[in-house]
């Protein structure tokens, strides 16, 4: 089985346009960041001043890409014109790895949301086949992220597999990497009544390229919405510690999409990731399977 050998380490931050000015104006604070992440479709065809500003960041930091539009589960054919743009973008900016969502977001048009796939054997084969096509076209292994979702396609009775079984089956058949989103595991665990810790323990650690942590919105005690618009909560930090104990320390990135705090407060969360990594490296690693 493959090992996710991504040339990254440390704690990262998702680069958003609203953060470019504050980070550029406070380089001594920006030194707290080990790598950055962007969605390639938001940057690939930009020109002019914004592209020059972006290139200044890619020259200073290692970058990874986390896509939004590939729509691996869509019934429509893969968009190879879009993939050609992604491939050129990855090469131009020396991006370390490319990940996408295990979901769909388009058919005849773009849905502007990440819709869950049915957890069935047929969907495993379909998604894995499309991931292989993408990897062949790009000439590199990609990673997939398990998404937050709020209803099971076709209803619970239509699900042949658990979410964990589905994700693991796609990973194995596609022979691809994994982006472990700790907040998604927490949100889904609450919303769908399973133990997020068991989900994280059950993933193949050797396939993990890197991890995400983020904040979410509490709609109700039994309904959490994955927004990336608030601070990471303590239960999610605890799950990150669990992920490190189970799978070893991996590069980890803070996602924040809006409602940004002042830069020192934002970077304090990045520093908390680094502190968790340092603490985990100082204690014995626990086996992923028990």
Image (tube, rainbow, N blue to C red):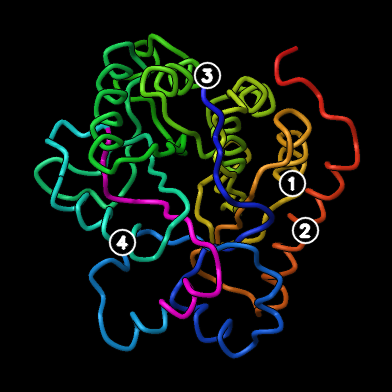
Circles 2, 1 touching at the beta carbon (< 8 Å): yes
- Considering only vertical position in the picture, is 173 above or below 105? above
Q: Nearer the viewer, mark 4 or mark 1?
A: 4
The 10 Å Cα crowd at callout 4, few under 14, some 14 to 19, many 20 or more, is: some
Q: Nearer the viewer, mark 2 or mark 4?
A: 4
Question: In the picture, which quadrant includes the C terminus?
Answer: top right
The span picked out in magenta is 55-72
Q: Is residue 233 magenta?
A: no
Label 2 to label 1: alpha-carbon separation: 9 Å
Circles 4, 3 touching at the beta carbon (< 8 Å): no
Picture quadrant of residue 271: bottom right
User: Residue 114: image x %, image y %?
Assistant: 34, 43
The 10 Å Cα crowd at callout 3, few under 14, some 14 to 19, many 20 or more, is: few
User: Residue 14: image x %, image y %?
Assistant: 52, 63
- Considering only vertical position in the picture, is 241 above or below 164? below
Q: Is residue 246 visible?
A: yes
Q: Nearer the viewer, mark 2 or mark 3?
A: 3
At 66% across and 80% down in the image, what residue appears? 262
């Amino acid at each position: 089985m493959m090992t996710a050998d991504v040339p990254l380490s440390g704690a990262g931050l998702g680069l958003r346009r609203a953060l470019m000015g504050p980070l550029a104006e406070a380089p001594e604070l920006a030194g707290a960041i080990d790598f950055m992440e962007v969605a390639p479709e938001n940057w690939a065809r930009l020109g002019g001043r914004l592209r020059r500003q972006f290139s200044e960041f890619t020259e200073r930091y290692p970058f990874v890409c986390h896509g939004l539009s590939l729509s691996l589960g869509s019934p429509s054919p893969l968009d190879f014109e879009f993939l050609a743009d992604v491939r050129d973008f990855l090469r131009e900016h020396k991006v370390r790895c490319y990940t996408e969502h295990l979901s769909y977001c388009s058919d005849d048009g773009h849905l502007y949301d990440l819709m869950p796939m049915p957890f069935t054997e047929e969907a495993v084969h379909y998604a894995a086949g499309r991931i292989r096509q993408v990897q062949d076209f790009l000439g590199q292994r990609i990673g997939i992220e398990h998404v937050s979702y709020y209803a099971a396609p076709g209803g619970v009775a239509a699900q042949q597999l658990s979410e964990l079984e589905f994700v693991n089956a796609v990973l194995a058949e596609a022979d691809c990497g994994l982006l472990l989103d700790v907040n998604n595991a927490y949100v889904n665990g609450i919303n769908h009544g399973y133990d997020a810790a068991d989900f994280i323990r059950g993933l193949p650690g050797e396939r993990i390229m890197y991890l995400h942590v983020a904040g979410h919105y509490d709609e109700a005690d039994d309904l959490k919405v994955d927004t990336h618009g608030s601070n990471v909560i303590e239960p999610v930090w605890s799950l990150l510690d669990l992920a490190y104990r189970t799978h070893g320390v991996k590069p980890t990135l803070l996602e924040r999409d809006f409602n940004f705090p002042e830069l020192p407060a934002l970077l304090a969360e990045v520093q908390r990731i680094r502190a968790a990594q340092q603490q985990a490296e100082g204690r014995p690693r626990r086996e992923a399977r028990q």
